[in-house]
Image (cartoon, rainbow, N blue to C red):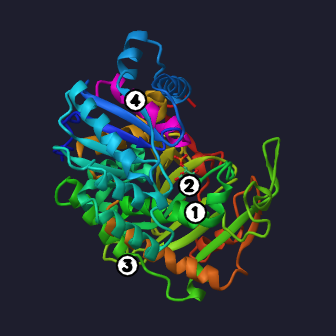
Amino acid sequence: MTYNNPIESISPEGAVYYLFGATGDLARRKLFPALFSLYKEGKLSESFAVVGLARRPRTNEQFRADLYESINEFCRYKPSDADLWNRFAQHFEYMSLDINDVNGFRELNKLSSELDKRFHIPGNRLFYLALAPSLFGPVSFNLRDGGMLESEGWHRLVIEKPFGYDLPSAQQLNQQLNQVFKEEEIFRIDHYLGKEMVQNIQVIRFANAFFEPLWNNNHIANVQITLSETVGVEERGGYYDKSGALRDMGQNHMLQMLTMIAMEPPSRLHGEDIRDEKVKVLRSLRGYASSEDVRRNVVRGQYTAGSLGSKELPGYRQEDSVDSESVTETYFAAKVFVDNFRWAGVPFYIRTGKRLPVKTTEVVVEFKAMPQNVLFAQKHDLAPNLLVIRVNPMEGIYIKINAKKPGADNAVQPVSMEFCQSCQIGINTPEAYERLIHDAARGDSTYFTRWDEVSHAWEFVDRIAQAWREDKSDLAFYPAGSWGPEEAGRLLHEEGFHWWPVNGQEEDNVIWITNSGK
Ligand code: BG6
């Protein structure tokens, strides 16, 4: 199977990129560096312009100085080549804009026509809203009313999560956007879909004869998806306290990874076909039948004071902008079933949390145990085979198998064979945002979430949230720096499983064969 996405070879056409929220954190940490990397790698033609937009007054010179600093600090390429830097920076303009004032958008339209002429851009416009979701509607209306959508060429809207707070609010937001943009013009970012290893799941599954035939309930015992973070809520207490782990990570990143693992092979490797298959998985998720069912299958927790390494850490309720009696979850784990022919009876265990001992994202596929009556299993306690996809921050995969220990006594030796991708290519993996901005500029929406994905994900999550609202007594507490509430282990123990340690931290007797040099 060749990976010939039809859009793959096309470089983006010339366009003006409008960055709303240009003085914010996302622009500084992710968006400016992504644009510079794309430019340096020749993935942006010379025919482009970027307009930074925010309320704060700023000259073009100040804006370009901010740009330089951000790239110097956060980009995988440094702006050390003065000639390259000057060529890049001259594409950037800043305009102070009150997003509630349509006259400002009319001014922006004039500036846009000038930029179109200056950089030979055929009227294509990409609007990147690094803003609070409550502003998506008003900005869209003013883009329309200020004449910004009347240029020849395409118009695309890129938005960040959270896309709503629950299904009704997401529907309302979507209705607003649909008054101005068509679904195919809306690019909803889930930055996990831009991660190299999340995209690699399809290749591992559909390009390897020894995985796909086993990829079903005959051979797979369970799937575990862990997304653990060492950070707390940092400066985002205000947002996070209203959101919590379920909405912040569950509704989007975790369910998206689950769909990539569980989906059927698409009939064609086209964006819409892939997204159709993902939607089928979301439709097959078994909704929890009652609040009691939620309590049996979902565990939530909140961190209390603790320590990580030598660092003493405050509890969640002591964080800035967090309610001192907050019952917001900073951790959740769930047992999820995908009720279709392929996955009937196979539990998917998902867990995520803040202030856990390590930062890692991993998918473990645990295969069923060998029958106990075969040769080696009679004498030895054979560990199951595992396929582990390491998403973040280390990238790679490993498989764990059983082999004979050299010598006469027929002892069995577990062996892990690893392809450490990050050891191979180091920092050169493109950042998720780089890939996603490039895709949006080329009109490839494969790795953006379509409205039906978003709405099915909310349906699933809303049932959990509702049960949690009704009865808060199941909120468990865990010290910062631990692996979360112990109850999360129960979800697996009752089926005879356990969470696999992350980062391959296993028993001492495993032999590692790896390209990482360890
Ligand atoms: C974001 C969440 O979407 O993802 C954050 O809002 C979280 O709370 C972040 O920290 C994790 O992303 P990554 O790429 O660092 O794993």
Residue 396 in the image, given as x and y percentages of width and height: 45, 41
Specify which label sits upstream in the sequence, 2 or 3.
2
Disc 2 target residue: 227
What's drawn in magenta, residue-wise? 24-43
Ranked by sequence position, the earlier of labels 2 and 1 is 2
Count residues near mark 3 (Cα–Cα under 10 Å), then give few for <14, some for 14-19, many for 20+.
some
Callout 1 environment at 10 Å: few (<14), some (14 to 19), or many (20+)? many
For label 4, the residue is 93
The residue located at (25%, 48%) in the rendering is 155
Q: Is residue 366 visible?
A: no
Residue 80, image x, y percentages: 47, 13
Q: Can residue 215 be seen in this snapshot?
A: yes
Mark 1, residue position: 351
* Contact flag, marks 4 and 2 (Cβ < 8 Å): no
Task: Give above or below for 316 relative to 120.
Answer: below
Q: Is mark 2 within 8 Å of ligand 1?
A: yes
Disc 4, SS: strand
Three-letter amino acid code at disc 4? Glu
Q: Which sits in the foreground, 163 or 314? A: 163
Q: Secondary structure at mark 3?
A: loop
Q: Viewer-nearest of labels 2 and 3?
A: 2
Could you give the CA–CA distance between mark 2 and mark 3, rounded to whole angstroms? 23 Å
Q: Secondary structure at mark 2?
A: strand
Q: Nearer the viewer, residue 251 or 496?
A: 251
* Residue 109 higher or lower than 219, as above or below: above
Q: Is mark 4 within 8 Å of ligand 1?
A: no
Distance of label 1 from label 3 (alpha carbons): 20 Å
Q: Amino acid at mark 1?
A: Arg
CA gap between label 4 and label 1 equals 43 Å
99 above or below 419?
below
Q: Which SS type dominates the magenta stretch?
A: helix
